[in-house]
Structures are given as C-alpha cells and as structure tokens.
Image (cartoon, rainbow, N blue to C red):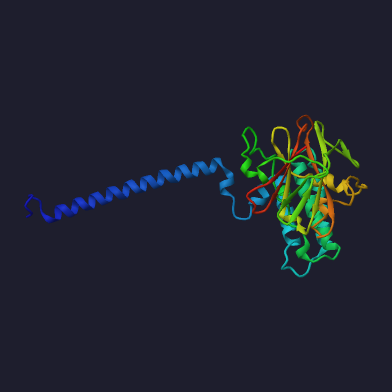
C-alpha cells in the first residue's frame, strides 16, 4: 500500500487509461485530418496528379514555352558534341504551327519572341558556329509582362551611372563595362516593319545604340521604359523583319542587335533594337541598359 492509500497497481492502471485516451485522441485527430485532406484533394484534382503529368495539365501557352526552353537548352549546351539539326528544325516548325493557332492569346507576343530567340540559336548552329558562340536566351524573352518596379516611385539617382539620366547627342558617350556606348539619334517610331504591323494602340520604336570596344553583348540587357516607367523587353519578332531592311542612321557598321554576339575592338558598331510600346505613352521613352552583376545602370531619355 502506498502513502496515498492507493496500491501500486492503481497508478499503473491510471497511466494505462491515460495512455489509451491519448491514443484515442491522436487517432481521432488523424482521422479528422485525413478526412479534411481527402476533402481538399477531392476539391483540387491537381493535387492528385502523379509525377510526370504536370506538363499535360498546363495550358497550351505554358506547354509551348516549356518545349521551347527545353529545345533551347539542348541547342546551347556546350558539352553536347552532336546536334540533330534537321530534327531540331522540324521540332521548331511544329512548335511554330501550334503557336500560330494562339495568335489571339494575350501571351502570344512574348512566346513569339521566345520562339524567335530559339530560332536564332538554331541558325547559328546551322552556320557551323561552335556551341560556345550561341548566345543564351536573353531574360527578355523567357519572361514576362511589363516590368512595373519603377512605376509610381521616385527613382534614386544612386542606381544610375554618374547619378544622372543622359540625353542623346552626336557627342554623347558613356563608358559602361568594357564597352563605350554612343547615343547619337532619337528612336524612330514606326507602325510597320516589313510586313509586320504593330498591334492596335501600339507602336514600334527602332533604337540605335553605338558600341565601341570589345564586348560580349549577352552581358547586357536592354529595356525601354514608357512615360509611366513601365519596362518593355525587345521585340525579337520585329527585329527579324528589321534585319531584312537596309539599315540607315549614323555612319559606320549597322546591324540588328539580336544578330550580333560580340563587338570588335576597332570602330563603332551601330546596333538596332526594336521595342513595342503603347502609342499613347511614349512621348519621352527611356532606354535602360544593365550589365550583369553591375550595381548601376545606364538611362538615356529621348
């Protein structure tokens, strides 16, 4: 008999009963949780998808983007020794056919730009260039809608080279990384480039940027900001049409930016970039150039 008047067996019995109660509570909780999880899963079929079914459940736009990125990765892999260029070309053509069926989709333009970038990669390989000369996909083409990070905010001059916004002129040059940039002309606004017409309410602007010095262009991203400081990526489809035209502007060598991998050390190379901007918001567009890893960027207001 224990001092409290209970026998030792009584304490063990109470512990056992308490243990049973805990087990029952845990079991009830587990059952309730399982019911809730089952209910949530029944309401969300996507959660029941087995591995490997995610691609089939994506929309056609997302599926095409996935296919283009996979093809691009294959083409730009420097460790790959052999390329079936005929098969890659046919694959790209089949993607283009599927893409044309989505011309009315809001994501069509960005996916078309991605398609043109992958097409450029394939063309470089077909010309016999080594894989390490294939430019990687610019961030501009894999993503996304207009960049709104500057909208409605006061831009801190500390993020800009020399803490100021430059203006174009025949004598305006800016040293940025290994390249010396020239900004001699205002952009040319156009509603059509070749047989490609700008969407209703939009305009193409052809921007001319001069580069002196030896520079790898894949190190630089370039964005056009409209009057509301919304950022728009280069429109690669329009640049493809522009490459068929006789480019004119400042004296020297002219080319479309997307067709140049790097600039040489001698002379000035004038590169043309095309952007699509809202026609009612491009009175004073700003060109932003940013070099990978740099804390500052170049702004030129036209």
* x and y percentages locating residue 255 in the rendered image: 86, 51
Q: Is residue 268 left or right of 35 when viewed as pictured? A: right
* x and y percentages locating residue 68 in the rendered image: 74, 53
- Identity of the residue furthest to the front in this view: 171
* x and y percentages locating residue 41 in the rendered image: 53, 44
Q: Is residue 231 left or right of 48 when viewed as pictured? A: right
Task: Give the quadrant of residue 169.
Answer: top right
**Quick one: 113 or 58, which is closer to the camera?**
113
* x and y percentages locating residue 187 in the rendered image: 82, 39
If the image is split into quadrants, where does the C terminus sit?
top right
- Identity of the residue furthest to the bottom in this view: 81
**Which residue lies at the image location 65% right of the left edge and 43% below the top edge?**
163
**Quick one: 109 or 66, which is closer to the camera?**
109
Q: Is residue 247 left or right of 2 when viewed as pictured? A: right
**Quick one: 222 or 27, which is closer to the camera?**
222
- Identity of the residue furthest to the top in this view: 280
**Which residue lies at the image location 32% right of the left edge and 47% below the top edge?**
24
If the image is split into quadrants, where does the N terminus sit?
bottom left
Q: How many marks?
A: 0
């Amino acid at each position: 008999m224990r001092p409290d008047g209970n026998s030792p067996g009584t304490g063990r019995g109470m512990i056992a009963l308490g243990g049973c109660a805990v087990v029952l509570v845990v079991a009830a909780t587990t059952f309730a949780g399982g019911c809730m999880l089952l209910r949530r899963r029944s309401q969300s079929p996507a959660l029941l998808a087995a591995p490997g079914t995610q691609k089939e459940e994506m929309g056609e736009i997302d599926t095409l983007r996935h296919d283009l990125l996979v093809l691009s990765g294959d083409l730009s892999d420097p460790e790959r020794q052999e390329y079936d260029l005929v098969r890659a070309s046919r694959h790209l053509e089949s993607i283009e056919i599927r893409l044309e069926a989505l011309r009315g989709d809001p994501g069509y333009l960005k996916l078309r730009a991605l398609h043109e970038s992958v097409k450029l990669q394939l063309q470089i390989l077909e010309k016999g260039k080594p894989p390490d000369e294939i430019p990687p996909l610019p961030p501009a083409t894999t993503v996304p809608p207009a960049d709104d990070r500057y909208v409605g905010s006061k831009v801190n001059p500390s993020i800009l080279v020399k803490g100021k916004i430059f203006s174009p002129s025949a004598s305006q040059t800016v040293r940025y990384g290994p390249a010396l940039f020239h900004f001699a002309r205002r952009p040319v606004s156009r509603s059509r480039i070749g047989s490609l017409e700008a969407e209703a309410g939009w305009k193409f602007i052809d921007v001319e940027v001069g580069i002196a010095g030896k520079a790898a262009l894949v190190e630089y991203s370039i964005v056009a900001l409209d009057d509301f400081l919304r950022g728009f990526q280069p429109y690669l489809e329009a640049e493809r049409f522009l490459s068929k035209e006789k480019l004119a502007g400042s004296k020297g060598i002219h080319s479309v930016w997307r067709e140049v991998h790097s600039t040489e050390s001698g002379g000035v190379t004038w590169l043309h970039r095309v952007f699509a901007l809202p026609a009612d918001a491009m009175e004073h567009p700003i060109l932003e150039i940013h070099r990978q890893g740099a804390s500052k960027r170049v702004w030129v207001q036209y």
